Amino acid sequence: MNKAKIAIIQSMDENYTFPDYEQLKKDIHYHNYRYHVMDDPVISDYEFDQLLLSLRAIEALHPDWITPDSPTQRSGAPPAERFEKVRHPAPILSLANAFSEDDIRTWYERIAKIDERVRQSSFVLEPKIDGLTVVLHYHNGVFVQGATRGDGEVGEDITANLRTILSIPLKIPVEAGDVEVPEVLVVRAEAFIMLKDFERLNQELAEKGEKIYQNPRNTAAGSLRQLDSALVAQRPLTILSYAIVINNPRDSQWETLEYLKRLGFPVSDYSQRCENLEEMIACTRGWLEKREKIPFDIDGVVIKLDDLRLADELGFVGKDPRGSIALKFPAQEVTTKLNDIGVNVGRTGVLTPYAILEPVEIGGVTVKQATLHNFDYIEEKDIRVGDRVLVKRAGEVIPYIIGPITDARNGDEKPYEMPKECPVCHQPVENIEGEVAWYCINSSCPAQIIRNIEHYVSRGAMDIVGLGIKIVEQLVDAGLVNDVADLYMLKRDALLALEGFKDKKADNLLEAIEASKTQTLGRLITALGIRGIGEIAAEDLGRRFDDLDALAQAGTSDLEAIEGFGPNMAKAITDWFSIQKNQETVRKLKAAGVWPVRSEAEQTAPQTLAGKKFVVTGSLVDFTREDIKVYISQHGGKVSDSVSKQTDYLVVGENAGSKLDKARDLGVTILTEAQLKSLAEREE
Ligand SMILES: NC(=O)c1ccc[n+]([C@@H]2O[C@H](COP(=O)([O-])OP(=O)(O)OC[C@H]3O[C@@H](n4cnc5c(N)ncnc54)[C@H](O)[C@@H]3O)[C@@H](O)[C@H]2O)c1
Ligand SMILES: [Zn+2]
């Protein structure tokens, strides 16, 4: 590609204001060729439409400049040499574009001024299927020839290829009841590939190690213009029909659709008829949402006058009929420059690459980053830093890179090398056998903060209600929280600056965080997430040490002296407190007032259950699961998860299951909650 073309492409993000008219025409011809003849566009449709708009703007100012070869005067591109040519029986027109409701109203007023009957006509809305026009000829009900649109006058004969498409009727049942079929019938339809079929096709190709396709539209166009129809037959192409080019026995678009359906042509179920302008505009509003549910790509909705005679009389401008217009959806795909590739470290330590982009607007949103899936993807697609890339943002999906535009390369692009170390903590990364993912396995890696916080706020730990994983991620991503202690430093204003935070949500969260300061020492120890120290062990520790400082000072021998604490647990605790980052967290917790001490109750509760082993089962009424464990340990008892010969008591709530059966079998004493209380609180 020449420099000028690269310049055009690159200038897209900047202020593309006044291009040279001749150059612009050349560029548009070039992109038409790439799109219509090569089925391999190098810019997005949105950008192409912008170029065309600029051209039209210039031509509106200088109508005398317009030559018959201007892209505004022709549709598509001339047919390729390799196919026979087919002259269409009537021009196969394109569609003018509207991008807003205002554009629709302007169009309406313009044609109503030409012919007042427009104000009486109803409208038909149809999905603007993102495929390619095919023109199907029938003689006496038999399919005899099929063509592409080409330049609108002459198309390419692709009959053999079209015969492989199962949804194209090869013979129309002429004798079908009361439906009359003209001797010569020419039907216009859109050929395309369903999204599911497209995904399946790409998956199959990927499994065979073959190149995958960019999008359904180019795949459909490329397939149909293959010379080998046996190959075409393997592509999941289908059609939907929407017009009769000549000899239409119906004079309403709505009835034409019905008629086509009667003849056995596939017709979209999504089309609608609207009585007047206001109703029609109201209907178009629903289409953006509808788009998400339609099983094929659409790039807009086509608005057609229902009165076809009137539409005919209105004629056309350039290649666009006056009687219909396409309301285009906001672009979902644009190209921009890939400035760099960054790497995220996920909760599990998994590394994921992402694209750092020259900011670009897609569908009203400025996109600066996009996902690159994984490192294999970058290699597979040969994505290089500095490349011009095609970015897609559709619905709620995270924007992603479709691929590089290799033709836009100038040699400055750099192949990407995967990092050897974690970008966050700089420890070497590791690949787990049999997985595509690469991991940072350093457990104190800041990226794993998220995981720690998730544990800290969980129900059995500090029980901070309303602090779900999404919010934790948000807080960490925003840099507001680097360890659990930072939760207590959160400011209202900072929360309100986050997406999705309103006054109430921020206040509730701050309140829940504040409330957690009253949790017991045992819970705080649980919340620290020391390896191997679960709720029960933590409660034990909470009863034996005055506060976290006292626990931090304990040596392994002190800890091993506690009943039920082995050397591993003791070491896990001393290890945890020896890490500087953890010491810092403890200091910060203390400063923030998150400093439970061994409570009076914990110290003075009579050790009435000392030495006894408990298991709890069923749904409790007086206690929560966490509380009952604390209660039992405060009174000196031990709680474990499963019933064994060592178990002294089984405390049962409602709907107790297998544990109760097992306890009975083993002769374990069974207690209700009330019985547990009287056992614990009895006078010695
Ligand atoms: N990216 C590029 O380089 C590049 C180059 C050229 C064209 N393009 C894109 O290709 C498209 C080609 O422009 P165009 O002149 O074919 O116009 P168009 O695609 O904007 O609109 C006309 C086409 O819509 C299709 N269509 C789908 N459903 C229809 C329906 N229900 N009723 C009527 N028509 C329906 C028909 O095939 C018709 O030819 C544009 O979207 C343009 O952005 C892109
Ligand atoms: Zn790391």
Image (spheres, rainbow, N blue to C red):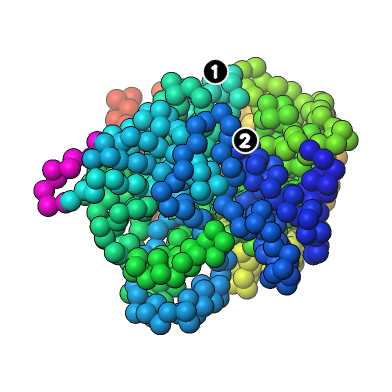
Q: Quadrant of residue 419?
A: top right
Q: Amino acid at mark 2?
A: Met
Camera-side residue of 400 and 90: 90
Q: Is residue 176 located in the magenta-colored stretch of the structure?
A: yes
Q: Which residue is mark 2?
A: 38
Camera-side residue of 353 and 140: 140
Q: Is residue 623 located in the magenta-colored stretch of the structure?
A: no
On screen, residue 418 above or below 516? above
| Label 2 to label 1: alpha-carbon separation | 24 Å
Name the residue at 51% across, 78% down: 110
Q: Amino acid at mark 1?
A: Lys
Instruction: Classify mark 1: helix, strand or loop.
Output: loop
Camera-side residue of 182 and 535: 182
Name the residue at 64% across, 46% down: 32
Name the residue at 78% across, 59% down: 21
Magenta part of the protein: which range? 171-179
Q: Earlier in the sequence, mark 2 or mark 1?
A: 2
Q: Residue furthest right?
A: 412
For ligand 1, tell me if the residue under mark 1 lies within 8 Å. no
Please give the label number shown on residue 208. Answer: 1
* Residue 519 visible in the picture: no
Name the residue at 21% across, 48% down: 181
